[in-house]
Amino acid sequence: MSQTRREVLLASCVSSFKIAHMKHLRIVLVCLLWWVILAPWGYAGQVDLKILYVNDFHGFAEPYQPTGSASPLGGIAYLAGAVDRARGKQPSLLLSAGDMIQGNAWANLFRGKSTIDVMNAMKFNAMVVGNHEFDFGPQVLKKRMAQARFPILGANVKGLPGLKPYVIKNLSGVRIAIIGVVTQETPVATHPRNVAGLTFSTPESAVQRCLGELKRRADIILVLSHCGYQADRELAARVPAIDVIVGGHSHTKILQPEQVGRTIIVQAWEHAKALGVLTLRIEDKKIVGFEGSLEEISPAIGPPNRRVQEIVDRYDLQTKALLNRAVGEAAVDLEGQHVRERETNLGNFVADIMRETAGAEVALINGGAIRTGIPRGRITVKSIYDALPFDNYLVAISLTGTQLKQALEHGVSRLEEPSGSFPQVSGLTFTYSRKAPAGSRVKDLTVGGRPWEPGKEYVVATNDYLVAGGDGYTAFGEALKSASDYSSVGGALTSSKLAYNDPGTWLRELVINAIKARKTIAPQVEGRIKAED
Amino acid sequence: MRVYVNEKPVDLVPGMQVKHALISAGRLEEIAAGRKVYDAWGHELGLDGVLTDGMKISVR
């Protein structure tokens, strides 16, 4: 019985009482009896709906011990077990705010297929594409969308058929519109080929357009946003018609739901280390209350979902088989032992691939990025993972000749003992003097076979670690700082100093692909770096 | 883009993450020692969380 009908019934009783006075007390009592009987249904317009959510899984299927943590966290099968328990008998939705299929080898080696298999088993209701969903290219993303037994959303992405702007779910008679939006920076957060032909409008304009279409078709507006918490707050402030934002991208651990105006904002950290639970109290199809929390996930919280665990285990076995697969042949030993003190053939090979991939004039990496060598013979995927264990990606920055020399000077500034900052290079040669003071050791620098020019701009390929100042390299940061031309291209921030940026492809994957293409490799030490004393 | 780590400005490539800002500010080792990173609203951040221009984070 609805609230209105109940009120009419009561009014009728009161009216009867006035008219018939005590004489009709019996009728009044009958009315009251009916009201008492129906009291539990007095909240018939009230219902609790549960929104369960995750974001930024990045293929972390197994529990792991995060830096600084005392015990392992996460594990997608344990998260699935928590979802089963949280669902209970309440009407609920299970949502993902994106970045699910790329990151860890468990996902990458299968181009996200393993993740979607798990999500299907967990019966997800909807997901928004994150920027990393584009990392394997549009053809792979189409396959993942076809594989998914739940809608994949992207209201602000144009040019990818199958990506829905929104979906409407009916829970206990309440119509929930779920609109998906992804960061407008996606085109500069992945390789350009991955987003060729696609356009990304502002999340705000896409949501406003959807709201226009959803008039009188939805009771609750929920935005699944892969834009980051700060952007979600701004979106909520600008579009107050949004009831709930379930966010991702910034990996924010929002322990209790936040509110901007009347919009509720939640996000569940990263890597399946937390399950978000938001309970909405709905009355007359409007939110009248809410409560929420994050449940930390670990093997200690309870039994895993067996079906999901089986899928995880199956792909684990396949991962091991794939890691032992040969990708090519090394005709010589690939020397990784002395990368911290001299030029090596493995350092040359990796630097060459980086320079060629980025279309740069020079490549420079820290020797510490290479952790071991690879013996002559069969090269397996695992041997490349062992040699290049870090999740580094390729970036190319435009440096002046002076900045390039400064970077090399830094690379040979700590020669007293092997140092991770010692450079491995491509596209240039130089000599250094051990006896000269640090900062004045580099001599006879050539780039592309020509003498180096201090005022000339050179595109230098490197890894994200050095760009961020890792191992004490400051030249790349200085170049970025000096760039006065940061601009918004289609809403994405970029700069002419940034020549190449592909956060979606690990450096080791580039190396694997290069070896596959060449079949047999025999890099040599060529005198790129010479010590004169 | 420029972000701030405990009020120190660091310049990064757009799309870079919390860990890059900590490397740039020389504070990544503090995470291994048990410290955590928080945004301007006091929420803990994952090291792979993507930063946006002007964002302020702190290690504590």
Image (spheres, coloured by chain):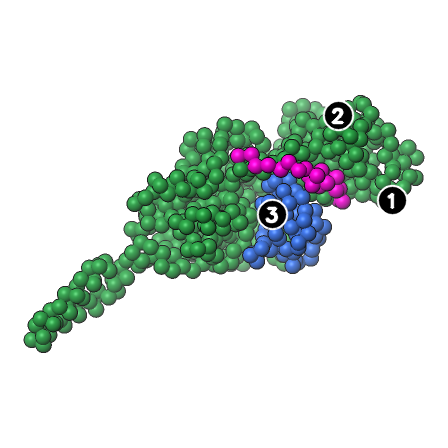
- Residue A480 falls within the magenta-colored stretch: yes
Distance Cα–Cα, label 2 vs label 3: 46 Å
Are discs 2 and 3 less than 8 Å apart at CB? no
Q: Which range is magenta?
A: A471-490
Where does residue A314 sit, x and y in percent of width and height? 52, 41
Image x and y of residue A262, in percent: 41, 55
Q: Residue at x 48, y 53 (%)?
A: A266
What amino acid is labelled 1 in the image?
Answer: Glu
Is A198 drawn above or below residue A422 in the view shown?
above
The image's mark for residue B54 is 3
Query: Residue A406: x and y, percent?
Result: 80, 37
Residue at 47 percent across and 47 percent down: it is: A235
* Residue neighbourhood size for the residue with mark 2, other residues' Cα within 10 Å, grouped as few (<14), some (14–19), many (≥20): some
Q: Secondary structure at mark 1?
A: loop
Q: Is residue A382 toward the left or the right of residue A223 in the image?
A: right
- Mark 3 touches mark 1? (CB < 8 Å): no
Q: Is residue A300 left or right of residue B25?
A: left
Q: Is residue A230 left or right of residue A484?
A: left
Q: Chain of mark 3?
A: B
- Residue type beneath disc 3: Gly
Q: Which residue is mark 1?
A: A416
Please, what is the three-letter code of the amino acid marked with disc 2? Ala
Q: Identify the element where label 3 is drawn.
A: loop
Where does residue A489 sit, x and y in percent of width and height? 56, 34
Which chain identifier belongs to the green chain?
A
